Image (cartoon, rainbow, N blue to C red):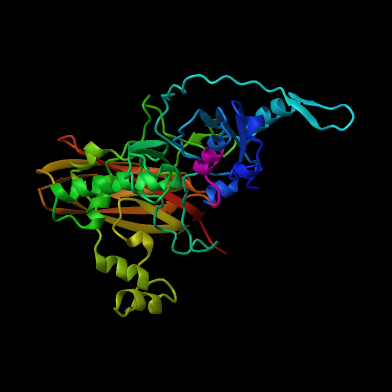
Amino acid sequence: MSLGECQDSSHLDADLIRGKILVCSYSIRFVLGLSSVKQALDTANDVSAAGVIFYLDPFVLGFQLNPTPMHMPGLIIPSSDDSKVFLTYYNDSLVRDGTSGQVVSFGGVAKILGGLNPNYGNSAPKVMFYSARGPDPEDNTLSNADILKPNLVAPGSSIWGAWSSVGLDSAEFAGESFAMLSGTSMAAPHVAGLAALIKQKFPSFSPAAIASALSTTTTLSDRQGKPIMAQRTYSNPDLTQSPATSFDMGNGFVNATAALDPGLIIDCSYDDFFSFLCGINGSSPVVKNYTGNSCVASTMTGADLNLPSITIAVLNQTRTITRTVINVAADESYSVNYSAPNGTAVSVVPTQFFIPSGQKQLVTFVVNATINSSTASFGNVGFQGNKGHRAIIPFSVISKVVYSS
């Protein structure tokens, strides 16, 4: 495999390759760190190749390939389908001996031009196919799945940023001052940086309050004002995309400016989370091991936590949910608007309230199932202030039971 992946120059004919383009396989071994683009480039340099083309092994599915610095002309074909087209051309261009079938010459021709121009899409942001989706159940009974995941989405696809030249995280970027990465490895630092800015402005905020400020101020539309889309498949992802739901993007796409002036926050304490964990059947020894504190009897569920979202995994006829909001801005009047998830009827009290700065307001939601269904449905709750503040929390219900026999 190391030969096809161009990891060892000792088995290659330098006289044959000199001045030509070397073709290498990009296999799962690259993803696992067993082979590297850097080593393949060293191999190409050892045999005086003019450039390198990596074709994608068909078994490398579901991985986002990061753009890699190359010190010679080269490219990675990031699609197995496009790689098949390239290999078909390569094989059809081979000249073989009519008797032995051995390759006499390599007829494939390529031209080295400038780099690719960036392609800026108007539909950004969108949820990539490799982004983890909700819900997050413990098992197929939907136990403890009353907490929305993901919380939100952030920039995480081919993000260009500063990189430590002495960093050892990736051999591909060793010695580089910049890198382009994708995945949680990029989305998480964006959110962590924004959290630090919120903590700087609001030093008394708890982690849950910071999460609320980030979550309730998100953007739900793309650059064109259309719903954010979510890719569904690895193959031809833009052809299978559909509008993102809360299980694709959580509360939405993070908005750095709005998060610094949330108006209302929905806070949750350590004791609340502790009670929730203790309410999980059989969790007491685990909770004791990690916290040093012993559980007392608790019936708190995930839906009872004061979170900036409402998720009901199993709605058995009716359920009452409460959320307590805190005003971290000036005195303001708010109206509460909502869209009920399909298959439910929702009532909210109050629908309007005045809340002084620093004060709390309890909001109660009564949710009734109107159909029997195991298909998740989605809505949202919006708090609109008369001084311009706006807070939106997603509302999702998975299983709905009107009556039980």
Residue drawn at point x = 52 percent, y = 51 percent: 33
In this rendering, position of residue 63 left or right of residue 258 = right
Is residue 261 inside the magenta stretch?
no
Q: Which residues are magenta?
A: 34-43
Residue at far right of view: 99
Depth check, front residue: 16 or 278: 16
In this rendering, position of residue 239 left or right of residue 144 = right
How many discs appear? Answer: 0
Residue drawn at point x = 28 percent, y = 38 percent: 255
The x, y position of residue 384, in whole percent, is: 23, 38
The x, y position of residue 373, in whole percent, is: 54, 51
Image quadrant occupied by the C terminus: bottom right
Q: Is residue 350 visible?
A: no
Q: Is residue 320 visible?
A: yes
Q: Quadrant of residue 16?
A: top right
Depth check, front residue: 123 or 146: 123
Residue drawn at point x = 19 percent, y = 47 percent: 198
